[in-house]
Image: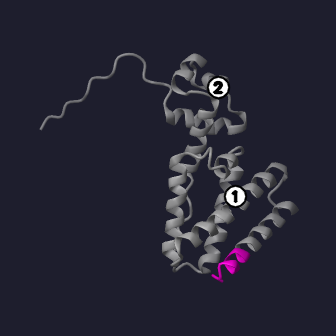
Amino acid sequence: MHTEIPAPARGRPPTITPDRLADIGIKLGLPNLTMANVAAELAVSQAALYKRVANLEALKRLVADTVFQRWQIPRASADAPGGLEAYLMGFVASLCEVVKAHPGLPPYLLRRSVATAPMLDKIASHQAHVAEVFGLPLDKARWLLATIAFYCIAGADTIYAIADDEEGQVITEFKQGMRALVIGSLEVLQLR
């Protein structure tokens, strides 16, 4: 059996692809992202870049969406030690790491008006997963995860912007506060 190999396309290969734009945006960081520095990284003109991306906000949304889609949300397991409380603390730790690694991401996670449809789909899927694993009504899982994620993202964004080291007093107090929020949220829902 003979399979035909397609002839290579004529001209230069495309240099402005969504994946390349996202990778460069992640490398530069959302706070430092400009059309000029992305065009320079791609070795293309800004005019060529504007043919692929409507504006800087569209580029930032692409980068934020890619970061979020690449983030591996911890999977829940009913058999894991510590149950739902331990799972939520692992979720908090993972969320803190993604916020710490990607300054400028929190507005895209906190404001539904700028979150992309795939981001919202991933959030809904995670909420349904946690509800199923721990036998929760979906509305309780949604409230629990949204509450914890909101305060974790907002707090981590502030803390990592001002803290100079991992062992700082502010970071320690933030982690204690997140634990209190997890415990209190479980109490409010009568799940503890």
**Residue 45 can be seen in this image:** no
Q: Quadrant of the C terminus?
A: bottom right
| Secondary structure mainly formed by the magenta segment | helix
Image position of 192 with respect to 111: above or below: below
Q: Residue at x 51, y 78 (%)?
A: 135
Residue 149's x, y, as percent? 67, 61
Q: Which residues are magenta?
A: 183-192
Residue beneath disc 1 = 96
Quadrant of residue 187 in the image? bottom right
What's the amino acid at mark 2?
A: Met
Q: Nearer the viewer, residue 67 or 148?
A: 148
**Residue 12 can be seen in this image:** yes
Q: Residue at x 84, y 53 (%)?
A: 163
Residue 156's x, y, as percent? 75, 56
Q: How many numbered marks appear?
A: 2
Q: Nearer the viewer, residue 134 or 141?
A: 141
Residue beneath disc 2 = 35
Using the numbered discs, state the Cα–Cα distance from disc 1 to disc 2 in whole angstroms. Answer: 28 Å
In the orientation shown, which residue stands out farthest toward the left? 1
The tag earlier along the polypeptide, 1 or 2, is: 2
In the orientation shown, which residue stands out farthest toward the right? 169
Residue 4 appears left or right of 192: left
Q: Nearer the viewer, residue 120 or 91?
A: 120
Q: How many other residues sit within 10 Å of disc 1, few (<14), some (14-19) or many (≥20)?
A: many
Q: Nearer the viewer, residue 59 or 37?
A: 59
Q: Quadrant of the N terminus?
A: top left
Image position of 80 with respect to 157: above or below: below
Residue 159's x, y, as percent? 81, 55
Q: Of helix, strand and loop, which one carries label 2? A: helix
